[in-house]
Amino acid sequence: MRRIKVLVVDDSALVRQTLTSIINSDPQLMVTGAAADPYFAATKIRKEVPDVITLDLEMPRMNGLTFLKTLMAQYPIPVVIISSFTQKGSRQALKALELGAVEILAKSEIRNTKDHLEESRILITDAIKAANMAPVRRRPLAQAEQAPDASLRDAAGDMAPEISTPSEPISKIIAIGASTGGTEAIRQLLEHEPANSPPFLIVQHMPAGFTQSFAKSLDTRCTIVVKEATDGEIIQNGHAYICPGGFHMTLEYSLTKYRLRIRSGELVNRHRPSVDVLFESVAKSAGHHAIGIILTGMGNDGAAGLLQMRNNGAITIAQNEATCVVYGMPREAVKLGAAQYILPLEGIPGKLKSLF
């Protein structure tokens, strides 16, 4: 089997050494080069083009975002961003996804200790394998970037009424699971949703420290309210709740209210948060009042949970292969018979509208 060639770009010698050790421990991967900054990386790419690049964002001489823009214009290679999870770092990482990066990881998750090395290895090697499967297109340097400065809700003026109130009855709950390519897919889906939509509960495989920035970014683009979920909150119509990275999210029903629970725990299907954990709780708590959607991503997380939702009376949807960045999670759901509908990404909002 041909091994996936990886170039590691990071200004920290310790991080380069740790990443190289972790990546080379997987028989499907091999580090073919390491660079301390983008200029050294460019030299190595000209000599040998890697299959995947791991890229730090904060580096001397040229930052990671500038390098990524140049790379996507000249050598469209799949990139896994490995960034610190400061607020600034998380915003930059999300911007990198918009510019063409495939996956993001937090440096805090690369812990070269006996207790955590195996978990770090799983996260890193899975991210690289997923990136290698993703199609990457050339992006001209002059390409316009969408960066709205204000929420669509603000366009109506500062005195715009609240789009939802806790007293509105919830007739449907929409649970969504995604991984590689999911940030863009979720954005495209939520941008179409009206202010009176049912609540969305979302698990996107993403490290701790990034989901808050992801939610804020979506909130500026959408009519509905998008926020990072908090433990114990009662869900409302017109809201989308993003599961915090590094935690699992479940749904409970009690005293006529649906409430979210956020907890830690072991990896489930190699992930925390896990789509299966959310879907199984929604199947139990909401039954036929739920809609389950599984989007692009590598692996099988969410397939069993979606089947449980369908068996409990929920409507279930899988994104089709043609519109997935990685057709892994939806494929496994389809193989299990968990999906009633297999739709292109752009067809899902219309289907939801017809179901409402």
Image: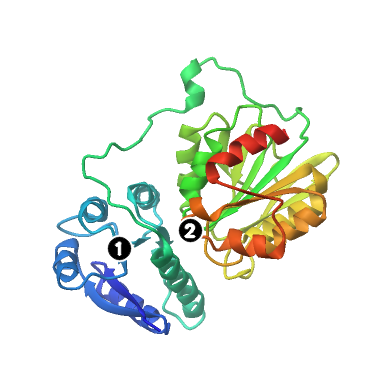
Residue depicted at 76% across the width and 28% down the height: 167
Q: Which mark is residue 343?
A: none
* Mark 2, residue position: 180
How far is mark 2 from mark 1, CA to CA? 17 Å
Decide which of tag 2 and tag 1 comes sooner along the chain.
1
Q: Secondary structure at mark 2?
A: loop
Give the percent coordinates (x, y) of residue 136: 35, 56
Q: Amino acid at mark 1?
A: Leu
Within-10-Å neighbours for mark 1: few <14, some 14–19, many 20+: many
Identity, as a three-letter code, of the amino acid under mark 2: Thr
In the displayed structure image, the side of residue 287 where residue 88 appears, left or right: left
Q: Position of residue 130 (x, y in %)?
A: 45, 66
Residue pictured at 60% horizontal, 37% vertical: 349
Percent x, y of residue 163: 62, 24
Figure check: 23 above or below 196: below
Q: Label 1 near label 2: C-beta < 8 Å?
A: no
Q: Secondary structure at mark 1?
A: strand
> Residue at label 1?
55
Label 2: how many residues lie within 10 Å, few (<14), some (14-19) or many (20+)? Answer: many
Q: Which one is in front, 105 or 60?
A: 105
Q: Answer whether residue 17 is visible to the viewer in this image.
A: no
Q: Position of residue 22 (x, y in %)?
A: 39, 79
Which quadrant would the N terminus be assigned to in this image? bottom left
Q: For the C terminus, which image quadrant?
A: top right
Give the residue drawn at x 41%, y 81%.
28
Left/right of residue 83 with respect to residue 217 in the rendered view: left
Q: Residue at x 75, y 45 (%)?
A: 290
Is residue 204 positioned above or below 147 on the image? below
User: Which quadrant of the view contains residue 30?
Assistant: bottom left
Q: Nearer the viewer, mark 2 or mark 1?
A: 2
- Place residue 350 in its image quadrant: top right
